[in-house]
Image (cartoon, coloured by chain):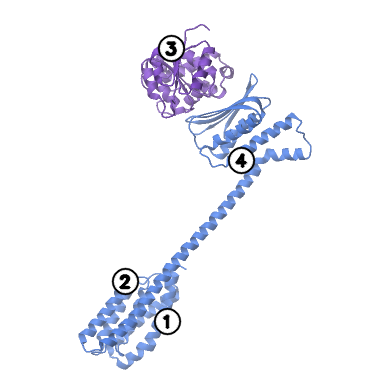
Chain colours: A blue, B purple
Amino acid sequence: MTDHAVFTTTRRVLLVVVVATQLVLALPALVEHGSPAPWIAYALLCCVLAIVAGHVAAGRSERFPAVAGAVVLAASVLATTALPEGASFGPADWAFGLIGWYLLLVLVERPVLLVAALAAHVCFSVAWFAHAGNGDVGTAGVVILSGTSFQVGVLVITGVLVRDARLAAAAAAEHDDARTREELARQREQDLKAGFEGQLGALLPLLADLADERVSVADEATRLRCSVAAVQLRRLFAENDDVPDPLLHELTACVDVAERRGVAVSLAVSGTATPVPTEVRRELVAPMAQALAAATGRAKVSLLRTPSEVRVAVVADAGDVLPHRGTVVTVETSVHSGLVRSEARWRTT
Amino acid sequence: MADDVTAVVVDDHPVVRAGVAHWLSSAGITLVASGESAEVAWTGPGAGASVVVLDLHLSGGTPATSALRRLVEDGRKVVVYSMRADDEIALQCLEIGALSYLTKAEGADHLVQAVRAAAAGHSYTPPALAGALAGDRSETRPALSPRETEVLVEWFQSESKEFVAQRLNITLSTVNSHLERIRVKYAAIGRQAPTKAALVARAIQDGLIGLDDL
């Protein structure tokens, strides 16, 4: 429930209270003790009532202008001054309580202004009472206290309702946020899974061939395929790790697999880390991973980051290395005196 | 090998001093003194050694760049031997005037070559240092020709000058002279040091580099 809903509901209830008070309590008193001046005040209040009723019926949300309060206060002055001597706060004073309810009705969203207007109304009535000088102080005190305390009570309750509504709205928003975050995390996990399946391309056919016994691990070619798949898989696992230098992290992962296979690998790094998109990292690492998978004895992996380029190279004593091709990186593979050299370059600028 | 290359080793680990002593003596280089502080290179037999092998991280703490600076200002030929492969510190040591910067991961071969080169007043660029030079992003870095950059990168990537020569279809001595030219370009920038000035002067004398290149 928003502030607006709280105020609209309060205003509806107040409207019923005001209509009832005006018809049941004020009208008979006015008819009994009336002279022309208070009828003007009554008519003024009826106009305000009609406007507020129209406002509520139309479901409009904006606050009433402060001038509505001034009109109500003017009616208060008219009604109070028209009272016969010493009639203030007595049965003939039809307006005192009613004006308070009117002020609540038009100024409920503005507590400070409302309290000021109520105080002004009470003060003026008390001043008029004191000016006449022959009224019963005890009755006046009871009337003022009972009337205003009830109205201030309504104001306080409205304030509490507004505060609770705001708390509830904040809690609801937080709950919604949590739901959204949960949904996003779920989506991300799904994307990750889909990405893994796409990346596993080389592995799944190999597993299928092995399971169907179409290939045998006794073959050199199959062992090479296994080796390539192992390096690819290890790189894929490293791809989503949250590390300061993801490219180096992936290279290290590939080196680790080759070292487990008994290849002596040295890794040299130069230059400072620069952000490299995941797609580019995949292409930069792939040729080197392939050469490492085929390496038999020694390999040297290097990562060089110059002001304009990122270069990943491998020099290894590998037999057959399939030439790689990149879309965003330039790959160059060559063989010199039994050593395969493969380098992937990516221009950062 | 009968040459008169003498060296002094400054390192706070006895095992490193012993290892370096063994490597150098196996290569015919006379180790005249060794110790755990730079004092050993200033007093006794160490003061006359032609090359100082200086560990940059004496007793943990801050790099011994001030010890390096004092030695270089005195005209000593220094090979920095560090356990850290930190590009920035390597470049800083070259700027101060070290003739070579080696990491302890690089083996005996590179150390012996670096000491020999330093004794003759030449620079020596091991692969890790080549990587640091290739990845240099400082404002003051000298302009290298595309060929020089290629040699630097290939040497860093392969650790084999023969391989670089084959790849680029040049001779081994051309690979070396490219590396020397690069170091001369680096020696010509930054603060003055006797070793750096000698490096530049010799390169110009030998026709390795023209004044226009600097």
Please state the horizontal and vertical placement of residue A344, each as a whole percent of the image: 58, 30
B144 sits to left or right of A290? left
Task: Work out how far the residue at label 4 is from the one at label 3, CA to CA, in angstroms.
Answer: 52 Å
Amino acid identity at mark 1: Val
Disc 3 or disc 1, which is closer to the eye? Answer: 3
* Residue at image location 79% in from the left, 37% down from the top: A213
Identify the residue under disc 3: B50
Secondary structure beneath dot 3 equals loop
Q: Please name the residue that numbered disc 4 is placed on.
A: A237
**Which residue is located at x 48 percent, y 62 percent?**
A171
Q: Quadrant of residue A158?
A: bottom left
Label 1 neighbourhood size at 10 Å, few (<14), some (14-19), many (20+)?
Answer: few
Q: Nearer the viewer, mark 2 or mark 3?
A: 3
Cα gap from disc 2 to disc 3, whole angstroms:
94 Å
Q: Nearer the viewer, mark 1 or mark 4?
A: 4
* Among the two numbered marks 1 and 2 on one chain, the one whose residue lies closer to the N terminus: 1
Q: Amino acid at mark 2?
A: Leu
Chain letter of disc 4?
A
- Residue corresponding to mark 2: A113
| Label 1 sits on residue | A16
**Residue furthest bottom in the image:** A32
Q: Amino acid at mark 3?
A: Ser
- Check chain identity for marks 4 and 3: say if they share one: no
Q: Which chain's residue wears label 2?
A: A
A45 relative position to A275: left or right: left
Answer above or below: position of A129 versus A175.
below
Label 3: chain letter: B
Give the Cα separation between the discs numbered 1 and 4: 69 Å
Foreground disc of the pair 2, 4: 4
Q: Is residue A291 visible?
A: yes
The chain carrying label 1 is A
